[in-house]
Amino acid sequence: MNNKDTLPSCPNEHKIVLLLGMRGITRDRLDFSTNADNERYLSFGHWLPIRAEDISYVQEYCDVKIDEISWHDDDCGWQCYYRIDS
């Protein structure tokens, strides 16, 4: 279960959870976070990618821009998270 710091913190983030849930991604696999610059981020599972069509679906029905940030780790392979701009 996610702790309070990783829960959605505004209506758009709750809508993201709802829309991704409609695409088969369950709430318990999503984590929200804030960096030192007060930017909001979303991660899925253990740095797993979300299908591009699912991100497009969210952006179509929610007033947010979501940017993927990804990198390659020699031990774990490709990892990513998503910056939320609302």
Image: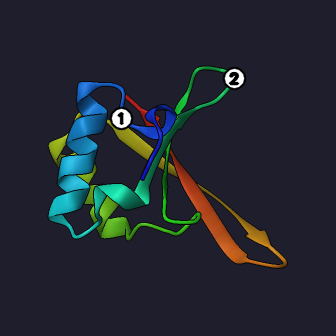
Q: Is residue 25 left or right of residue 50?
A: left
* 4 left or right, relative to 75: left
Mark 2, secondary structure of its residue: loop
State which quadrant residue 66 falls in. Answer: top left
Counting from the top left corner in percent of width and height, residue 21 is at 21, 60
In the picture, residue 54 is in which quadrant?
A: bottom left
Q: List the residue tagged with mark 1.
A: 8
Q: Amino acid at mark 1?
A: Pro
Task: Give the residue displayed 64% in from the left and 67% down from the top.
Answer: 79
Q: Is residue 1 above or below residue 23?
A: above
CA–CA distance in space, label 1 to label 2: 17 Å
Q: Which residue is denoted by mark 2 in the rendering?
A: 36
Q: Which of the pair 8/78 is nearer the observer?
A: 8
User: SS of the residue at dot 1?
Assistant: loop
Q: Residue at x 22, y 70 (%)?
A: 24
Circle number at residue 18:
none
Direction from residue 19 to residue 9 in the image, left or right: right
Residue for point 35% across, 35% down: 8
Which x, y percent locates residue 74? 84, 78
